[in-house]
Image (tube, rainbow, N blue to C red):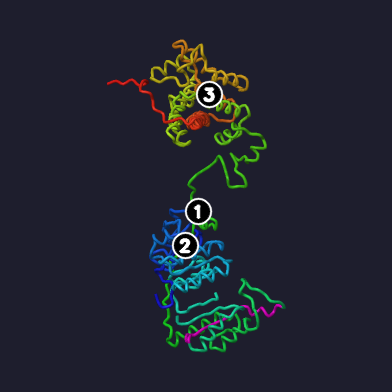
Amino acid sequence: MATGQIFSKTTQALFYNYKQLPIQRMLDFDFLCGRETPSVAGIINPGSDGFQKLFFGQEEIAIPVHPTIEAACNAHPTADVFINFASFRSAAASSMSALKQPTLRVVAIIAEGVPESDAKQLISYARANNKVIIGPATVGGVQAGAFKIGDTAGTIDNIIQCKLYRPGSVGFVSKSVKMMVVLGELGGSDEYSLVEALKQGKVQKPVVAWVSGTCARLFKSEVQFGHAGAKSGGELESAQSKNQALRDAGAVVPTSFEALESVIKETFEKLVEEGNIPPVPEVTPPPIPEDLNTAIKSGKVRAPTHIISTISDDRGEEPCYAGVPMSTIIERGYGVGDVISLLWFKRSLPRYCTQFIEICVMLCADHGPCVSGAHNSIVTARAGKDLVSSLVSGLLTIGPRFGGAIDDAARYFKDAYDRGLMPYEFVEGMKKKGIRVPGIGHRIKSRDNRDKRVQLLQKYAHAHFPSVKYMEYAVQVETYTLSKANNLVMNVDGAIGSLFLDLLSGSGMFSKQEIDEIIEIGYLNGLFVLARSIGLIGHTFDQKRLKQPLYRHPWEDVLYTK
């Protein structure tokens, strides 16, 4: 880098306190400038690590995130600029920590409100250790065509219009190189240092200067502009006095701020004509790809969605289930069955239907610790696994042999009834195919020891359903199967499957195609999964509450054979 230059096209920075937009603007500037590597080497987000995804032109990149300043400096030894976006409360401490890192050379502090004593301490330490402090309360800094800090220079459109994407010949100094442009402000005396330097010949390059705040004299009382330093403390600190002193010292000072642009242009063109400044060749900057969300909002592009949702919407003031606001669900006293009705069936079913759903959930919530699902959850919980693992281990046993026959029972009963098969024709036909009749048969229940759950469901349906034709057909099938074996009784799968057919067809709210689709998709097995999750969670909590040890199956209960 040239003498006095603190940034170059290879400068890399560490960004403290993750802020997505300022970092993305830095990367967009890098891309405009034709940099080969991004200027942000790493992000420091106290207590966090990993990566943050951002864009470098069209390419999506992952920038490392580090939990401490020390870790970031060790990981990126070539990054010598520290951009501090911490709040004013922690900016001083984090900046001092950065200054003490041997790899960091420049520290930019964005926060306003840093105590003056802290700022002086930072500046003193930086000077003593040959380091640079930019700020506090700074927008940042920019090296045209090379590097910029955070939000410096504004929008991409402004950067392109000002041609900051390529090097130039004019240095701009703000109270904030062949020629200098200085923009000062009323208050303070910094501009007089430049006046003395011009008088003493220390600055021999052309200087175009303007001190803003000339309108302050129009006010009867003292006026502060923008920040604490932008107010006049006396005549010498007025904009008029500073402009006149600069003009007397040889600087080119326009008559007004509006004339500044033309004076800069005239001075520059004169230097070019005299051969003091070689014209900088123009380059066309690459276009910055527009963010998809921005482009969509502006109507410039169309983008396909990745997910379709028809059951709920969380974009408004409150979530809606199938178009029903959450507040309405609560105000109308809806129960779990009503919520299932909305989220599963996308309509508000009559109360007798939703109450039947709730009864199914209650009756199927648990069937003791010995069934396969509960056993698996218990063994997993006793192995020290978490709730989700224990629950899933039990749910994975649900299938055609355990609780997963409701859909099949409904499917076969419906097909047989709709085709007008006599019960014996249906049973014998299934036998010829080698298929057990789903919903018929029980390990411990029999003709003389009926499943109480089945009886409760049938009793409710007789009292509330407008039609129970499918259930009655299932009962006729049961009568035939009991003539063959005493344990071929209707089980809870068969009861729920046949009665749900009556619910769907009898409610008048579903077409035949919709009913077939509901059965095919697996809605009815979903009821068992939902219900049994309650019991499996209960067994998991029970084992953990009892602090049960790791389960080992007794060898006495295993038949060892060759």
**Front disc: 2 or 3:** 2
At x 48%, y 84%, the residue is 269
Q: Amino acid at mark 1?
A: Arg
Q: How many neighbours does mark 3 have within 10 angstroms: few (below 14), some (14-19), or many (20 or more)?
A: many
Please tell me which residue lies in front, 82 or 521: 82
Task: Assign the N terminus to one quadrant of the image.
Answer: bottom left
Q: Is tag 1's residue or tag 2's residue first in the polypeptide sequence?
A: 2
At x 48%, y 47%, the residue is 306
**Above or below, 147 relative to 320:** below
Quarter of the figure with residue 556 = top left
**Above or below, 334 relative to 155:** above
The magenta segment is 202-219
Task: Assign the C terminus to one quadrant of the image.
Answer: top left
Q: How many neighbours does mark 1 have within 10 angstroms: few (below 14), some (14-19), or many (20 or more)?
A: few
- Residue 297 in the image, given as x and y percentages of width and height: 55, 56
- Residue 235 in the image, given as x and y percentages of width and height: 65, 83
Q: How many neighbours does mark 2 have within 10 angstroms: few (below 14), some (14-19), or many (20 or more)?
A: many
Q: Is residue 425 left or right of residue 299?
A: left
- Residue 316 in the image, given as x and y percentages of width and height: 61, 47
Please tell me which residue lies in front, 233 or 226: 233
Q: Is tag 2's residue or tag 3's residue first in the polypeptide sequence?
A: 2
Task: List the residue tagged with mark 2.
Answer: 15
Mark on residue 496?
Answer: 3
Element carrying mark 1: loop
Please tell me which residue lies in front, 559 or 554: 554
**Above or below, 369 relative to 252:** above
Q: Is tag 3's residue or tag 1's residue first in the polypeptide sequence?
A: 1
- Residue 520 in the image, given as x and y percentages of width and height: 47, 30
- Asked if the magenta segment contains residue 396, the reply would be no
Task: List the residue tagged with mark 1.
Answer: 302
- Asked if the magenta segment contains residue 210, the reply would be yes
- The Cα–Cα distance between marks 2 and 3, rounded to whole angstroms, is 61 Å
